[in-house]
Each structure stands twice: as structure tokens, then as C-alpha cells.
Image: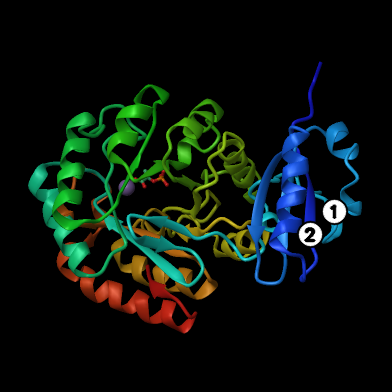
Amino acid sequence: MAVNVSPELLIVMSPGATAEQTEHVVARLQEAGVDVRVSPGREATVIGAIGERELLASLPLEAYPGVEQVLPILKPYKLVSREIVPDGSLLEVRGRRIGHNWFGLIAGPCTVEYREQTLETARAVAAAGATMLRGGAFKPRTSPYTFQGLGHAALEILREAREETGLPIVTELMDPRHVEDVAEVADVIQIGARNMQNFLLLSELGRAGRPVLLKRGPSASVEELLMAAEYVAKEGNDRIILCERGIKTFERSTRYTLDLGSVAVLKHETHLPVIVDPSHAAGRRDLVLPLARAAAAVGADGIIVEVHPRPEEALCDGPQQVPAAEFAAFAREVRDVAALMGKEIG
Ligand code: PEP
Ligand code: MN
């Protein structure tokens, strides 16, 4: 028998509702076996009720004191939809923030190649005020004959970089068998564009206990991205950052086509923070800064950008990596645009 376990209702409390009234509604829902997400908004508290349709229908929700409105969630994505957290979510990791008025500046090498390369980059981006350090340990490469990443050895280097700089680590998970190992070092687990619809991998992230940076697949629609995020949220992990990194189109002048419109749409549709990867979208260094500024201007909550001490020697994505020596100036330019949007580097 198919069981409908999708979250179905939004219970909007009246602006004057008391905390006790909200708690009462939550308690009744929980007693009935319904999962609840409470979002204390600026204007009113919103309760998302997640459970079987029949179960929800059996509760006299409108009759509870303090309840103003009970609405069905009509979108196919429920837990990640904006309605659940009308003010948007803020992600906080080791004191660094992304979302609300905080602009996340995630920077670091495409790939961890060797200890000094990563530490040098980490020092440069930390000095420039970066929010987090990125670096690939397990790399999704188009060709099986190219460098595939240092794997576990890279995780140890990233751990050392965090110890030295204090920057939280963002690194990619490709294989569900590595969940524990990656989660041990990663403060944020990246799911790469190619794995956006690897549903088994997504479901594993519920037990990883780490925030997730979910990149949009090169051929995925905005709705497919949101449904992929829903897979993670459904497992009880809604600490998710979405990332627009360019899509495949007929256009060849950039590596991918950066879909900035999707950022505006996503900010409307979901409460999750949305960031942009100008590096993979551009594919060439000279375009990374203008795309990064555009990302800040369109209202993104941050960027993830590739930085290397000597891009000409990089084992992966050299043409698009910003030289570490230029990163402080790069960061200032992005910070200025973010400031126009009322945001500070988080
Ligand atoms: C990356 O960020 O290192 C990466 C491989 O990006 P994407 O998954 O967007 O191609
Ligand atoms: Mn790369």
C-alpha cells in the first residue's frame, strides 16, 4: 500500500498568538504522529505539518486557539519551500554565516593536490576574509585518465588547513561508502553537479549530520534541483545550500551558461540559502569576477570560487582558478557589491 508521507499543511498562527498557543498546536500534532517544523517569522509563526494526508485531515486545526489559517502546500517541494520559512534560512557553521544578511565567500582550490598548495591557498583566502575553504578530495572527472583527487590523504590536508586557519571545510562526497569519512572532516558536504540526482547518495545525507552544499546539475531544471534538496530534507537534514553553477546550452563562449535568473527564482521559491559558482560557469579566469559581482547583485547568498597559488600548474581547472595573490582584491570587489545589497561577508 502506498503511504502518503508528504508534508501537506501550513498552519499560520495569528500575529498575536502566544507561545503557549503555538506549543499547544505543536503538541496536538505530535501526539497524532505528525512531524512538525516551526518557523517563528517576523509577522507570524508558521508551522509546517508533515504527515499522512488522512491523519492531518482528522485534526480540527482551525479550531485551535491562535490559529489564523490552515493552507495546503501546493508545491511539489514541501520542506524546502519558502512558505515553510518565509524569512529564509540562515546557515551557521563554526561561527560563519550564510543567508539573511550574510554573504558566504567560499574559496579554495578546485582540488587538493599537495599539502603546501592547499595550505598556501587556505592562508590567502583566510587573510582575505573568506567564510569557508573549499577543496576537492574526491573529484568527479569527465575522463577516467585524469587526476581523480588524493582521496583520504586530501581529507587530512583539509583538516590541517582548518586547524591552522579556522576556516570551515567544504568538500565533495561522491560515494555513499565515504559518508562517515568525509563527514568527519567536512563542515559542509558538497554534492557535485553530476550527482545532483543520485538519490541514494542524497538520502544518505540525512545521517551525515552535516550541512549540504547541493550543486545544480548541468541539465537540471530549477524544480529538479528543489526536488533533489527535498530528498535531503526529507531525511531530517534541512541545512542545505543550493548552488547555481551554470547549465548546458548551445552557447560555447563560456564553459557553462550561468543561469542567474534561476537564483532570483530560487530566492522566491525556497527558504534555503542560494549561492553561485562563477568559476565552473565561466571556465576562464577573466570572467570569474564579473560573474561573481553579478551573483552578489542578483541577490545570491554567496559564491564558491576556485583559487590556486599557481593556476598554470593546477592539476584540474587551471584556466578558471583565481591566483591566490589576487584573491584579496577579488574579495574586496565582491564585498562591495554585496554591501550594496545590504550584506556583509559571513
Ligand atoms: C567542483 O566544485 O569542484 C565541481 C566539480 O563542480 P561541479 O560539480 O559544479 O562541476
Ligand atoms: Mn573545479
Describe the colour scheme in one phrase. rainbow
From the top left corner, tell me how far across and down residue 43 is, in percent: 71, 71
User: Which residue in the rendered view is the most extreme toward the front?
Assistant: 20
Left or right: where does residue 106 sit relative to residue 234?
Answer: left
The amino acid beneath tag 2 is: Val
Residues under numbered marks 1 and 2 in contact, where contact means CB atoms less than 8 Å apart: yes
- Return the disc, 1 or 2, that comes first in the chain's sequence: 2
* Comparing labels 1 and 2, the label whose residue is closer to the camera: 2
Question: SS at mark 2?
Answer: strand
Q: Residue at x 86, y 59 (%)?
A: 69
Q: Residue at x 34, y 26 (%)?
A: 178
Packing grade of label 1 (10 A; few <14, some 14-19, many >=20) is few
From the top left corner, tell me how far across and down residue 128 is, in percent: 22, 70
Q: Does residue 34 appear in this view?
A: no
The amino acid beneath tag 1 is: Leu
Cα separation, mark 1 vs mark 2, equals 8 Å
Q: Quadrant of residue 227?
A: top right
Question: SS at mark 1?
Answer: strand
In the displayed structure, would residue 286 be above or below residue 162? Answer: below
From the top left corner, tell me how far across and down residue 160 is, in percent: 14, 45
Left or right: where does residue 122 sit relative to residue 81?
Answer: left
- Is the C-beta of the residue carrying label 1 under 8 Å from the nearest atom of ligand 1? no
Which residue has dot 1 on it? 71
Which residue has dot 2 on it? 12
User: Which residue in the rendered view is the most extreme toward the top?
Assistant: 1
Q: Does residue 111 appear in this view?
A: yes
In the displayed structure, would residue 237 be above or below residue 124? Answer: above
